[in-house]
Image (cartoon, grey):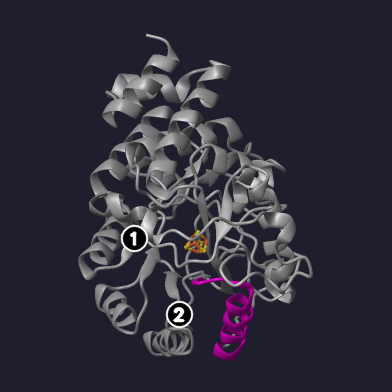
Amino acid sequence: MNGNHLADKLAQTGNLSDEELTEVLLSEDPALGGYLAAKAREVRERVYGKDVYIRGLIEFTNYCRNNCYYCGIRSGNAHADRYRLDEEEILSSCSSGYALGFRTFVLQGGEDPYFTDERMISIVSAIKKNWPDCAVTLSVGEREKESYQKLFDAGADRYLLRHETADPGHYRMLHPEAMSFEHRMQCLQNLREIGYQVGCGMMVGSPGQRAEHLLKDLRFLQEFRPEMVGIGPFIPHRETKYADYEAGSVNLTLRLLSVIRLLLPEVLLPATTALGTVDPKGREKGILAGANVVMPNLSPTGVREKYLLYDNKICTGDEAAECIRCLTARISGTGYRIVKSRGDHITEDSFDNASDTLMPEVEGATALGTDGTALPQDKV
Ligand code: SF4
């Protein structure tokens, strides 16, 4: 059976055997990626139309108590220039983002003990009070279930916690003894039980990763059925033990985006900044492979170059308005359109109503926000 037949089978049945999925992952057939992407686009358009959702990313602390071996802001990196945003600065970023059309704010940071439940509750409550039509996504690592519950009660809607790898042995290669695979998985279960829309995901091409690990990742995603999946290529950081390792493959990342879209048709799937870092057209290619979310940076420009999980990260110097203008043009060039929406997960039950929730037709990037701030009422 050639690769295209496997792509057809995956699109028709929503699944493949272990052997077939492995064949897709390892295939060197250059045509397979394009064929898989076409199938993935059909599925994403059936569920989400042509819409691409934006998330305003606010990287509010690069302090972290952990020492993940691959990460540029791990606690053991004495050269990281540490910073924290205070509540006022975070709210100011949200305010600018709201004016630009963002309706989801993602608060992302290392596991920083300074941000106690009390401080996080205050921040989340203030965002929900000021902008009640917006969703708040948290991405602040592992916490106890009670803590997740308090933040949910304060108004947080979604939580991103990459599982990084579904294989315990591989997890141990990437993380020190103080961290636990079981605890990471338990955190994901806890988030689900509480009622968050949950995102997980993994790096593609991380040190020691083999096809069998990716297969386990895909099986885990099928079983856990997260509302969001974030994947991007591994990119080395010079201050880590994996500094000399090669970055993950763009083509494999794109193929995985398509496979994940076909396995989980309704998933929210970002074309990540990491993908745009290893390939100048990476985010556009990600959208064309089945992704439907982009996450422009809303952090103040003064701190962006300090939040370096990996080297050579893009978009560390531009103002938020410039970022959204650039992305709007890029996405428009793919035939898709950025919309002003919370961009919630659509369940299979709501497929029939999906068109009711979508925004009206966009007029095109050239009409949008040419001064970088004055964007249309219903689009950014
Ligand atoms: S990957 Fe996350 S938890 Fe690990 S060191 Fe980096 S910021 Fe901390």
Callout 1 secondary element: strand
The answer to whether residue 28 is visible is yes
Residue in the picture at 25% in, 62% down: 192
Residue 254, position as x, y percentages in the image = 53, 35
Residue furthest to the top: 1
The answer to whether residue 179 is visible is no
Q: Is residue 51 above or below residue 379?
A: above
Q: Quadrant of residue 180?
A: bottom left
Residue 26, position as x, y percentages in the image = 46, 21
Magenta segment, prevailing SS (helix, strand or loop): helix
Which residue is nearer to you in this view: 350 or 159?
350
Image depth: mark 1 or mark 2 in front: 1
Amino acid found under the numbered disc labelled 2: Pro
Q: Is residue 9 above or below residue 63?
A: above
Callout 2 secondary element: loop
Q: Earlier in the sequence, mark 1 or mark 2?
A: 2
Q: Could you tell me which quadrant the N terminus lies in?
A: top left
Residue in the picture at 44% in, 55% down: 176
Q: Which residues are magenta?
A: 87-106
Residue furthest to the left: 193
Which residue is nearer to you in this view: 321 or 371?
371
The answer to whether the residue bearing label 2 lies less than 8 angstroms from the nearest atom of ligand 1 is: no
Residue 357, position as x, y percentages in the image = 39, 61
- Left/right of residue 99 with respect to residue 155 in the rendered view: right
Give the numbered dot on residue 113: 2
Circle 2 residues within 10 Å: few <14, some 14–19, many ≥20: few
Residue 116 on the magenta span = no
Amino acid found under the numbered disc labelled 1: Val
Give the numbered dot on residue 198: 1
Residue in the picture at 63% in, 73% down: 100
